[in-house]
């Protein structure tokens, strides 16, 4: 058994998880998981799938997959070599020789001049025809009818006076609603970690609700992990962290869960599509 497989197996056993739990989280067949723990990487379907399976396995048990592959990547089978295709030979192309007398260019210029002259003749004939049409006699204009005398203004109906709108009394403004326990604001990402700042809160209350599938998650602070759970579709779990200035979450496939921090939603739409997503809330 290699050091890579020992690290994976130890992390799984420390979390009290079975290979069935890992299969349900990562969707990797059990026979491939058993081959990984036994170090039989030749059973896996190719170099690419070997790295992908080990990366998902590591994230499911809470390990840093990038660091793990960086340290023990030499234990994996090397990728197949790709043979380079031979460089095609370039065929020499001889320049096309033009005639020394330039007769082809001379004929092209003559035809171009004849075409321009023909266009000018057509335009001139069209202008002459339009001028002849405009010179035709116009029909006599009709006599204007005498204007009718202005109506007597004294007999015109007087409109009724406009009604003055009476302003209605202003309705009282609604009473202000109590603010949430602290204010949660997003912060810039650090690597792949989603960061939030929480100001004005004594404790941090986290509620996780699973929309689809099964998800493993853990909650901790800067001193280490405090709790962990595996939730199925439709299940919820509440966590409360009273000590420490940071709350660190690790959720597998976080896009399919709803996360509330002190009653305020955390945007997980940009979380990783597979593996565990790290979320950090800093209390200020």
Image (spheres, helix red, strand yellow):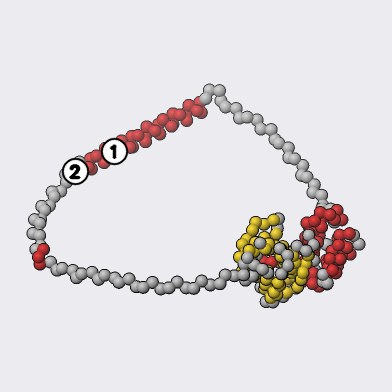
Q: What residue is shown at x 50% (from left), y 28% (from top)?
A: 105
Q: What residue is shown at x 51% (from left), y 28% (from top)?
A: 104
x then y, percent, for residue 129: 26, 40
Is residue 145 rendered to the left or right of residue 114?
A: left
Res 136 visible = yes
Q: Which image quadrant is residue 97 in?
A: top right
Of 277 and 202, nearer the camera is: 202
Q: Which mark is drawn over residue 60?
A: none
Q: What residue is shown at x 28% (from left), y 38% (from top)?
A: 127
The residue at the far bottom in this view is 235
Of 60 and 172, nearer the camera is: 172
Q: Quarter holding the C terminus?
A: bottom right
Is residue 107 rendered to the left or right of residue 77?
A: left
Task: Residue under label 1, please give it.
Answer: 127
Q: Which image quadrant is residue 55 in?
A: bottom right
- Image vertical order of residue 233 relative to residue 222, above or below: below
Q: Residues within 10 Å of mark 2 (few under 14, many from 20)?
A: few
Is residue 76 rendered to the left or right of residue 151?
A: right
The residue at the far right in this view is 1
x then y, percent, for residue 117: 37, 32
Q: Which image quadrant is residue 268 in?
A: bottom right
Q: What residue is shown at x 11% (from left), y 63% (from top)?
A: 153
Q: Secondary structure at mark 2?
A: loop
- Image vertical order of residue 228 relative to residue 106, above or below: below
Q: Secondary structure at mark 1?
A: helix
x then y, percent, for residue 184: 62, 64
Ranked by sequence position, the earlier of labels 2 and 1 is 1
Label 2, label 1: how far apart the Cα atoms are: 15 Å
Res 252 visible = no
Q: Which mark is drawn over residue 136?
A: 2
Q: Quarter holding the N terminus?
A: bottom right
């Amino acid at each position: 058994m290699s050091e890579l497989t020992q690290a994976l197996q130890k992390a799984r056993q420390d979390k009290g998880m079975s290979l069935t739990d890992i299969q349900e989280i990562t969707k990797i067949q059990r026979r491939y998981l058993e081959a990984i723990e036994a170090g039989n990487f030749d059973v896996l379907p190719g170099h690419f799938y070997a790295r992908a399976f080990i990366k998902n396995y590591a994230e499911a048990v809470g390990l840093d997959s990038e660091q793990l592959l960086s340290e023990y990547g030499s234990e994996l089978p090397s990728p197949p070599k790709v043979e380079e295709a031979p460089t095609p030979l370039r065929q020499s192309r001889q320049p096309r020789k033009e005639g020394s007398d330039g007769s082809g260019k001379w004929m092209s210029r003559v035809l171009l001049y004849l075409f321009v002259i023909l266009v000018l003749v057509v335009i001139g004939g069209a202008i002459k025809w339009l001028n002849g049409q405009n010179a035709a006699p116009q029909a006599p204009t009709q006599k204007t009818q005498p204007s009718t005398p202005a109506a007597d203004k004294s007999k015109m109906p007087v409109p009724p006076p406009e009604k003055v709108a009476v302003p209605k009394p202003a309705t009282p403004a609604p009473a202000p609603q109590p603010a949430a326990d602290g204010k949660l604001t997003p912060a810039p990402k650090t690597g792949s970690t989603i960061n939030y700042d929480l100001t004005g809160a004594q404790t941090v209350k986290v509620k996780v609700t699973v929309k689809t599938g099964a998800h493993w998650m853990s909650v901790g602070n800067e001193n280490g992990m405090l709790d962990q759970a595996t939730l199925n579709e439709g299940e919820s779990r509440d966590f409360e962290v009273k000590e420490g200035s940071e709350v660190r979450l690790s959720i597998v496939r976080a896009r399919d869960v709803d996360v509330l921090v002190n009653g305020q939603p955390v945007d997980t739409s940009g979380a990783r599509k597979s593996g565990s997503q790290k979320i950090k809330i800093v209390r200020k």
